[in-house]
Image: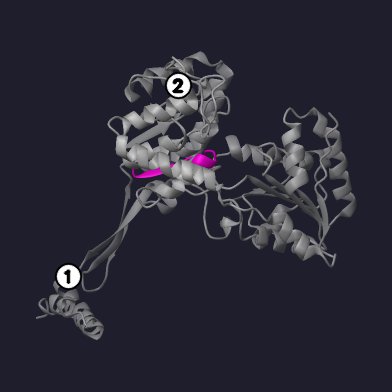
Amino acid sequence: MNLKASPARLSTASASFEADFKARLHWSAESDAKIEQVVADILVDVQARGDEAVLDYTRRFDGLSAATVGAMELSQADFKQAFDAIPAVQREALQAAAARVRHYHEAQKKASGESWSYRDEDGTLLGQKVTPLDRVGIYVPGGKAAYPSSLLMNAIPAHVAGVGEIIMVVPTPVRGSVATGGSGAQAASTQGERNVLVLAAAYVAGVTRAFTVGGAQAVAALAYGTETIPKVDKITGPGNAYVASAKKRVFGTVGIDMIAGPSEILVLADGSTPADWVAMDLFSQAEHDELAQSILLCPDAAYIERVQQEIDRLLPSMPRAAIIAASLNGRGALIHTRSMEEACEISNRIAPEHLEVSSHNPQRWEPLLKHAGAIFLGAYTSESLGDYCAGPNHVLPTSGTARFSSPLGVYDFQKRSSLIEVSEEGAQALGRIAVTLAEGEGLAAHAEAARLRLR
């Protein structure tokens, strides 16, 4: 197979740059109408029939048969057995990554997640009470495409926040079954394709309960509750188009983290980093799927050419070469800019999920960068380190939403209540203000409630 990866070559000096640039960035987040209808039907059915519907859809889509949903619940012993069964090097890697993720989120909690209050001169107390959510649901992709790192990134900040129960759902399809949305074979198995690293990660991260259920039916079960699967307050974690559509539809009944689009990387380079490093960093997102986006911004035209040469050289050695090629050909771009300053401006317009500042002096450019899910400073800071073990969360806003949203964190598993305790003296001053404003709005009971407390 003679694969070629030729990202679009753009130049900010070109008269057609704006049009070409917008066309390359365009991605429609609208789900296929058929997916939306399938998901809508599943949600209604699970809400109405509970466990029975979950069993039916799990049998249909994952080829996994069980007498009860309880038979598909994973135990703490299953987690421990999986942890003990994996090689020592994997156990150590999981624990080291978990420790760094936990340390980062503990620091985050101290910085922004504590309750506070103060009293003003008349003795009135004002403040904020921060409390954790009672129960959250974490969706973890399962089967062969399994992501223990995503489990760590979702469960650990929830644990640090103080969430009482962390409920994991993870599909374990029978080998050869059809993915959600198709019609899988009936199978006499309650085991399915369990990924031992995911279960080991659940042991390390402190998951409370787990069920081998996936797809829209798992989201519905978490959102509405069934006879066996408890209703949660918030659902986080990645999934396919059916999972994303279901999360969008249940928002309001429960909280959700975000609606994620295809993965993205933007490399802002000054030409000082080895070209093969940058080419591989572009590959690291392109290998996710054909819709992933990898972009290089650089003022050095000769360096851009060297990166393209490395893309050509390295692509044949990649196990997922076909996916990388499709991603780079369809959505990738190598953009020649007039300067690093202009590159920073364009980066802010894109607001990428992952932003690498691959330059000799990244601290010079970091103050110019306003919008990104995560910023990776310096040639040695590959995005993949952030995905697995650096510490900050790898669940990041995509599709330009970094302009107004943030990475998953401890704050996503907490809520804030305002504290107000007005003293008798304070009620005299505040009451008169409230009476005036309430009467101005025509709300007599509001005004009288404040007036009754006036001396």
Tell me: 395 left or right of 54.
right
In this rendering, the answer to whether 345 lies above or below 27 is below
The residue carrying mark 1 is 423
In-front residue for pair 320/406: 320
Q: Residues within 10 Å of mark 1 (few under 14, many from 20)?
A: some
- Point out the tag, 2 or 1, that comes first from the N-terminus: 2
Residue drawn at x 60%, y 38% is 387
User: Can see residue 96?
Assistant: yes
Task: Indicate the quadrant containing the N terminus: top left, top right, bottom left or bottom right.
Answer: top right
In this rendering, the answer to whether 384 lies above or below 405 is above
The residue carrying mark 2 is 64
In-front residue for pair 397/357: 397
Q: Are marks 2 and 1 in contact (CB under 8 Å)?
A: no
> Mark 1 is on which residue type?
Ser
Instruction: Identify the disc placed on residue 297.
Output: none
Q: CA distance from mark 2 to mark 1?
A: 62 Å
Between disc 2 and disc 1, the foreground one is 2
Tell me: 295 left or right of 421.
right
Taking the view exactly as shown, the residue that stands out farthest to the right is 302
Q: Which residues are magenta?
A: 232-242
Task: Indicate the quadrant containing the C terminus: top left, top right, bottom left or bottom right.
Answer: bottom left
* Residue 50 image point, x, y percent: 31, 34
Q: Is residue 75 magenta?
A: no
The secondary structure type at the circle numbered 2 is loop
* Residue 78 image point, x, y percent: 41, 18
Q: Residues within 10 Å of mark 2 (few under 14, many from 20)?
A: many
Q: How is the image coloured?
A: one colour
* Numbered-mark total: 2
